[in-house]
């Protein structure tokens, strides 16, 4: 996180199954528990603190899943994100989100696992859609 997000305190490290955050501006303290370690990205956009949690994929066997949630600072759910299944002629070939990172514009870039390889796309926070998908790496 950058200095701009200094009012958000995120207590999570890779491998943890509990994600905690608090936002002084919102006066909130949130704790979320997961069965397997998730991936977490937090940022501020349009004056609002947002936390994206990518729940770990179940790779045994790969099963299509909507495994990413966008939260407000107070812990309320904005969107449960669905990977764009129209990327493949077989919707079951799109498994779910693998990871995410902040892109150059400060907006999350999500990586989607598919049977044909990984795809990345930019998150549109207003609609909850993943846009501009293309092959990752």
Image: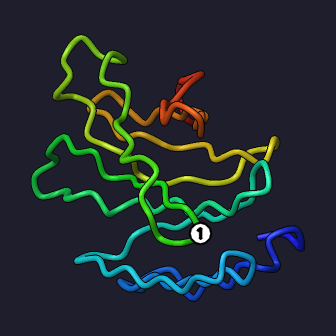
* Residue 29 drawn at (x, y percent): 54, 86
Name the residue carrying label 1.
Answer: 73
The structure residue drawn at horizontal position 56% and vertical position 25%, both measured from the top left corner, is: 131
Q: Residue furthest top?
A: 89
Picture coordinates of residue 13, whole percent (x, y): 54, 84
State left or right for residue 115 relative to residue 132.
left
**Residue at the (29%, 77%) spot, across then down:** 34
Residue at 50% from the left image edge and 80% from the top image edge: 14
With respect to residue 57, does 111 lie above or below?
above
Q: Position of residue 100 (x, y in %)?
A: 55, 53
SS of the residue under disc 1: loop
User: If the image is split into quadrants, where does the N terminus sit?
Assistant: bottom right
16 is higher (above) or lower (below) than 49: below
Q: Position of residue 11 (x, y in %)?
A: 57, 88
Q: Is residue 55 visible?
A: yes
Q: How many residues crowd around disc 1 within 10 Å: few (fewer than 14), some, or many (20 or more)?
A: many
Q: Residue extending furthest left?
A: 61
Viewer-proximal residue, 20 or 131? 20
Q: Quadrant of residue 6?
A: bottom right
Question: Image check: 99 left or right of 81?
Answer: right
> In this picture, is 49 found above or below 3?
above
């Amino acid at each position: 996180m950058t200095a701009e997000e200094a009012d958000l305190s995120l207590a999570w490290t890779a491998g943890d199954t509990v994600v905690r955050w608090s936002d002084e501006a919102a006066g909130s303290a949130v704790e979320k528990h997961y069965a397997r370690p998730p991936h977490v990205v937090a940022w501020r956009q349009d004056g609002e603190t947002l936390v994206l949690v990518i729940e770990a994929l179940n790779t045994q066997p790969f099963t299509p899943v909507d495994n990413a949630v966008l939260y407000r600072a107070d812990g309320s759910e904005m969107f449960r994100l669905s990977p764009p299944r129209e990327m493949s002629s077989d919707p079951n070939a799109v498994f779910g989100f693998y990871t995410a990172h902040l892109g150059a514009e400060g907006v999350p870039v999500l990586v989607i696992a598919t049977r044909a390889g990984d795809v990345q796309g930019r998150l549109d926070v207003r609609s909850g859609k993943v846009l501009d998908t293309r092959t990752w790496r």
